[in-house]
Amino acid sequence: MTDKHFGPYPITAIKSLGRELVVWVQAPAIQAAAQPGQFVMVGLGRPRANFLKRAISIHAVREGEIALAILQVGDVSRALAGLQPGDEIELIGPLGHGFDLDPKGGPVAMVAGGIGHAPFRFLAEGIKDKASDLALYVGGRDKAALAGLDWAKAAGLEVQVATEDGSAGTRGFVTALLEDLDPDTRLYACGPLPMLSAVQRLALDKGLACQLSLEGKMACGVGVCLGCTCARPDPRATYAKVCTDGPVFWAEEVDLHG
């Protein structure tokens, strides 16, 4: 894990994309140290809000800035949506271990459930010259859940979508789009636990290299609160901490089926 930085940082831009909010923050020390797949703990100083910091993936970076993609639900997102450029938010980061950035020259499939696409913009920038093909597979409940994908289209990624109600792309779950992957494909997945569990099972069954970005209920983000533990395949092994051992794990490193 890289050195952590913390403090108040000013917002430089906020953009609403349907149910998602993209917030750019001037945080040069965090930007310089960040790796794809890492996250920050985000909070607001009183009296604006009174809640624990939330773990949010680093969505993208540019010179001196990081972007956060946030689903607009709950107290945190509502509070952030009410801010303006120039307002400050509190950040701690970068935190955790990120993605492996060497797909061995083969095809890459990034698999997301809803806002699970958030870390893939940063990842795509890091591996676009190292993969023979780069595709994004995204699933959601409906078309509105897929409103934040402009970045992928602008980057020229192959984008395939699935919705549970059939309002966009293929009807059903995103994992149905993965049945015919090239055997050399590197999988990266981020999203709800049932989706990650299905991707993990598919990868292990087919022998595909796969990394999973897990979510966890974190109060600290630095391994103290033990709120984000995850079982290992060996029941005798110590539970993994999503915040410090992850959030990115190889598929064989964690047990999502227990």
Image: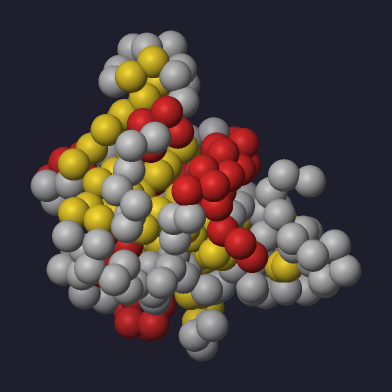
Name the colouring of the figure: secondary structure
Relative vertical location of residue 240 with respect to residue 114 in this rendering, above or below: below
Residue 171 drawn at (x, y percent): 39, 15
Say which of 22 and 193 sits in front. Answer: 193
Residue at image point 23% right, 68% down: 105
Q: Is residue 45 visible?
A: no
Residue 116 drawn at (x, y percent): 45, 44
Residue at image point 56% right, 39% down: 198
Q: Is residue 209 visible?
A: yes
Task: Check the image and name the residue furthest to the right.
Answer: 236
Q: Quadrant of the N terminus?
A: bottom right
Say which of 227 and 220 sits in front. Answer: 227
Residue at image point 34% right, 12% down: 167
Relative vertical location of residue 176 with respect to residue 123 in this rendering, above or below: above
Relative vertical location of residue 117 with respect to residue 126 in this rendering, above or below: above
Query: Is 82 on the left-hand or right-hand side of 64?
Result: right
Residue at image point 27% right, 76% down: 64
Residue 207 drawn at (x, y percent): 48, 55
Count of numbered badges drawn on the protein? 0
Query: Is 202 on the left-hand or right-hand side of 253?
Result: left
Residue 152 drawn at (x, y percent): 21, 45
Query: Is 43 on the left-hand or right-hand side of 156?
Result: right
Say which of 62 and 167 sits in front. Answer: 167
